Image (cartoon, grey):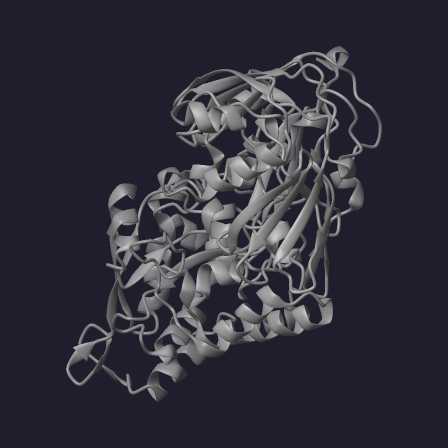
Amino acid sequence: MTLTTRLARLAALVAVMALAACKPAGEAPRIGDGQPSDGRLDNGSLSYAAEDYRESAPGKPGGTLRVSTSSDTTTLDVHSISHGNVQWLGRILFDCLLYQDEQGNISPWLAKSWEISADGKTYTFHLRDDVTFSDGEKFNARALQVNLEHMRDPATKSPLAAAYIAPYVDGRIVDEYTFEAHLREAYTPFLDVLAQSWLSMISPRQILEAPKTIAERPIGSGPFVLESYTRDQGASFVRRKGYNWAPPVTRHQGEAYLERLELSIVPEPMIRFSALESGQSDFTVDAPAQNARAIRANPELQMRSRIRKANPFRSLTFNVERFPFEDVQVRRAVAKAIDREGLAWITGFGEYLPKGDFLAANTRYYDPAFKDVLAYDVDAANRILDQAGWSQRDAQGYRVKAGQRLAARLLTYETGAFPSSVPVAIQADLKKIGFEMAIDQLPLAQVTERRYASNFQAIAGGYWHTNTPDGLFILYHSQAISTPKLIGQNAGRFRDTELDRALSAARQLQDPVALAAAYRIAQQRLVETVPAVPVFESHVLVAYRKQVKGLIFDTSHNTPFFTSVWLDQEAR
């Protein structure tokens, strides 16, 4: 798509008219070179420098970091939610049992070492003996057992942590610092998911004696302690005295450098940018894409762009049990008719990498062989629909077959990550192939209710991050379809025997060659069956003032790791 075409498309969409007008004429968008700002693309795969994940030198203690974010998690019980902010927020208050290294392999954190039984069903963890929670409770085998039980307790109502440890049956305390976890079946992603922030360790005393207080006054073992929290306004954190157990991969030793961290909830992108530019804030974990060019042009500011592992952002997900998306040919035609590069531009203003396959390019076992199978091709989409029997058109130009128009409704809600301009653009794209897509924009609560009830034909937007390619199982395996006892993420009720077989096998396998083969089959099957339409990689955009030093990124989530951040007070 040329720059002129992009600008014309932007101008047609009211939500982005003002921003489009600010774009310099004749300047090519950044996505045109196919290169993310922080990473390296090599034949379709994406990697980051090892130095991005570890301290290069000790920082200077002291100071208060003022941070803004676009939304509130509404609870600080990380076991009970799937909110994306937990990715970085969890590392402020909590620690995890394990951590990933720079290559995505499992490394120690609160667990020093571990063994896995030959059948893959028993994991024995040897724990550190010097870790305490901020209420004085020890982290030990009992604490680990209590946390695992809390994650899967129905009262926790976990949409994420419980699903990630679903194969866990029970555990045995071998001694104070040795814990044996028993699984009902081999489950290769078990160690990976235990490294994610949603599966952080909470004080066992709080879990057992005051579980309702976790939502607003959580007690962790992390580098900071919560001082105050006001929902939808912000939170204050103070440095944890005596903290000395950061993940070895980070090469950070001792306490966090920052004395305090002040977090503000600022939904308006322009206000987050203006506060950063004026020096009223030091750091935003949700840098507005529309201001990225201005941030990069400002010598006082720094911009970083990262991509989350596993699942890219989806433009829409099909309900394969509803007309017309029970037909794979229709799904394939829709996928090829949607201009992903155009949508990436509308949403990311040149910051987002368009995506046509189902696994993020920086994920283990990603195979770029299928990245162009669903490439934007209006002529091909038209041919597919002709071959599927939708060759006739009515007076309005929409396709018809046996007296029925090729039409559906797209369920959506307004969000900063997926603004209303995107469904409008999808609607325009599909009209070009004779497909009528109406838009139902509803409040989030109604969309969520209809999503879990499968009361839709297509649903817009969404990403589901995890640090393992098992994210494909979470979204597309038939066992991930919601039931009265399971909050599943397979919203489109998609079922495919060959895909199920490959993803189930991957959960049993240990050998990297066999795992690569299983995930290759899964990735190929997904572009063939098209349960959803990927649109662009799931990006993390952060920006900060030049006084902020020592930023490294979490290996699981590619989000800021604030333990190592420090402030150059002299540069302020």
Task: Name the residue at 43% across, 39% down.
Answer: 81
Give x and y (percent) for residue 400.
21, 80
Furthest residue to the front? Answer: 174
Q: Return the x and y of residue 4 as percentages of the image width and height.
A: 50, 56
Q: Residue at x 17, y 85 (%)?
A: 402
User: Could you say where residue 423 lies in the image, as x and y percent from the top left?
Assistant: 34, 54
On the rendered structure, is 530 left or right of 273? left
What is the count of numbered marks? Answer: 0
Above or below, 217 relative to 471:
above
**Residue most extreme to the right:** 57
The residue lying toward the viewer, choosing from 239 and 262, is 239
Q: Quadrant of the C terminus?
A: top right
Q: Quadrant of residue 537?
A: bottom right
Q: Is residue 539 left or right of residue 21?
A: right
From the viewer's side, name the closer residue of 312 and 433. Answer: 312
Above or below, 301 relative to 292? above
Q: Where does residue 546 sit, x and y in percent of width and height?
A: 70, 24
**Residue at the extreme left:** 403
Q: Is residue 443 visible?
A: no
Q: Is residue 416 visible?
A: yes
